[in-house]
């Protein structure tokens, strides 16, 4: 009997909200796919890694942000949402903690705050993810 190997990957995305300004933090992607496009901070879950810990790790690796409470807001897995293959993303929401030094790191070319009513074109299905909290 052959061993089944899944071709589905799990990722995490994080919505960082500044409730005082009604803004969301986005990164400009450094790499393909969607190089130079704006996206939510996030990335692949490592083997044996907890989902929320993956979200915290990716957020820190890309934006230098450490955060408090995270709330899971949904799972997004429509085939075709990522050109690299079938990816299922578990999305989290968190509020900005004051006095954070935000800077682009790792896979992020740039980080910037955007008003929720004036978002740029976004990579993947990130607009759909953001719209779940509006």
Image: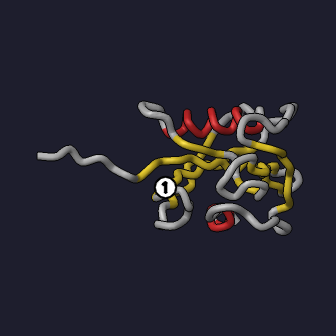
User: How many circles with numbers are drawn on the protein?
Assistant: 1
Q: Is residue 37 above or below residue 59?
A: below
Residue at 81% x, 38% y is: 104
Q: Secondary structure at mark 1?
A: strand
Residue at 84% x, 36% y is: 103
Crowd around label 1: few <14 · some 14–19 · many ≥20 (10 Å): many
Residue at 81% x, 65% y is: 119
* Left or right: 55 as drawn, with respect to 118: left
Between 4 and 77, the residue placed more toward the observer is 4
Residue at 77% x, 32% y is: 64
* Left or right: 8 as drawn, with respect to 95: left
Between 61 and 55, the residue placed more toward the observer is 61
Residue 36 percent coordinates (x, y): 78, 55
Please give the residue where the numbered disc 1 appears in the rendered image. Answer: 87
Between 126 and 34, the residue placed more toward the observer is 34
> Which quadrant is the C terminus positioned in?
bottom right
Residue 32 percent coordinates (x, y): 67, 52
Residue 15 percent coordinates (x, y): 69, 51
Residue 24 percent coordinates (x, y): 79, 54
């Amino acid at each position: 009997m052959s061993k089944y190997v899944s071709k589905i990957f799990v990722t995490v995305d994080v919505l960082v909200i500044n409730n005082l300004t009604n803004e969301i933090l986005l990164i400009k992607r450094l790499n393909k796919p969607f190089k130079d496009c704006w996206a939510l901070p996030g990335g692949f879950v490592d083997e044996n890694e907890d989902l929320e810990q993956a979200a915290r790790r990716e957020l820190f690796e890309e934006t230098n942000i450490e955060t408090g409470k995270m709330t899971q807001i949904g799972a997004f897995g429509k085939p075709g949402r990522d050109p690299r293959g079938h990816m299922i993303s578990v999305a989290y929401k968190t509020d900005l903690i004051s006095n954070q030094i935000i800077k682009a790191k790792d896979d992020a070319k740039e980080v910037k705050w955007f008003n929720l009513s004036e978002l740029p074109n976004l990579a993947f299905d990130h607009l759909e993810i953001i719209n779940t909290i509006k």
